[in-house]
Image (tube, grey):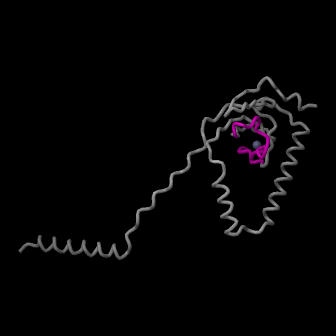
Amino acid sequence: MREEEHLLPGAERVRTLAGVTVRYQSQGLPLARYELSRADRRRQEEAESIARWVAEQLAKAPPLGPEQLKTIEALLSSADSSPREYARWRVRLFCGHIAEVERPADQDRPDERLWDKETCSECGLSPAVIVAFEHIGLVCEPSPPPTPPTPPARKKPSRAELELRVAALEKENERLRAENLPN
Ligand SMILES: [Zn+2]
């Protein structure tokens, strides 16, 4: 099987994160010449047909009501907010372009779970499956801290207040003018 040729177990890197050992895998050399395998083509076709299906379902789905939007918002904001480490990978996409991608650091390869495809920033192929990859290192960057609550905007003076202020200024102006008038 051709795919076996691309596996280079020697290039693995090991990392212990929160007591869990992650053995980063690699597949082929993203920067080397690469010929697409039959398995690559099949995965790309599958990814494209899944993307088409999802797009069709979304087009058919009724728009979300306010209640549903609220639920989704709540789900998103309650999502795991603990600092998370990310690993960087160099990947070769189906179209032949090379990209750098980030994945949660506890993932030992960049092409599993929901993350097996990318949108190519060079040619726009979307989805583009990953056909070769190598681990580059960790992004030593915890997820950004929660944004501090924005300070309440300074209360704008109401129109009535502005009018009062203008009137006071006009009065003051008149007084000064009267003072300065030559007698
Ligand atoms: Zn591309």
| Image spot of residue 146 (x, y percent) | 56, 49
Left or right of 3 on screen, residue 173? left
Q: Position of residue 1 (x, y in %)?
A: 94, 31
Relative to 4, say whether 104 is above or below.
below
Residue name at image x 87 percent, y 48 percent: 46
For the C terminus, which image quadrant? bottom left
Report the magenta stretch's main SS: loop
Q: Quadrant of residue 131?
A: top right
Nearer-the-camera pick, 66 or 133: 66
Instruction: Compare residues 73 and 115 and report the one nearer the observer.
Output: 73
Q: Residue furthest top?
A: 10
Q: Picture quarter containing residue 58?
A: bottom right
Q: Residue at x 68, y 35 (%)?
A: 88
The picture places residue 28, in percent across and down from the top left corner, at 81, 30
Ligand 1, what quadrant?
top right
Question: What span is in magenta?
Answer: 104-125
Instruction: Return the residue nearer the eye: 30 or 16.
Output: 16
- Whether residue 18 sits left or right of residue 182 in the image: it is right
Residue furthest to the left: 183
**Would residue 110 be counted in the magenta stretch?**
yes
Q: Is residue 121 above or below residue 14?
A: below
Q: Residue at x 66, y 48 (%)?
A: 80
Could you say which is closer to the camera, residue 93 or residue 46? 46
Q: Position of residue 133 (x, y in %)?
A: 77, 34
- Does the magenta portion include 119? yes
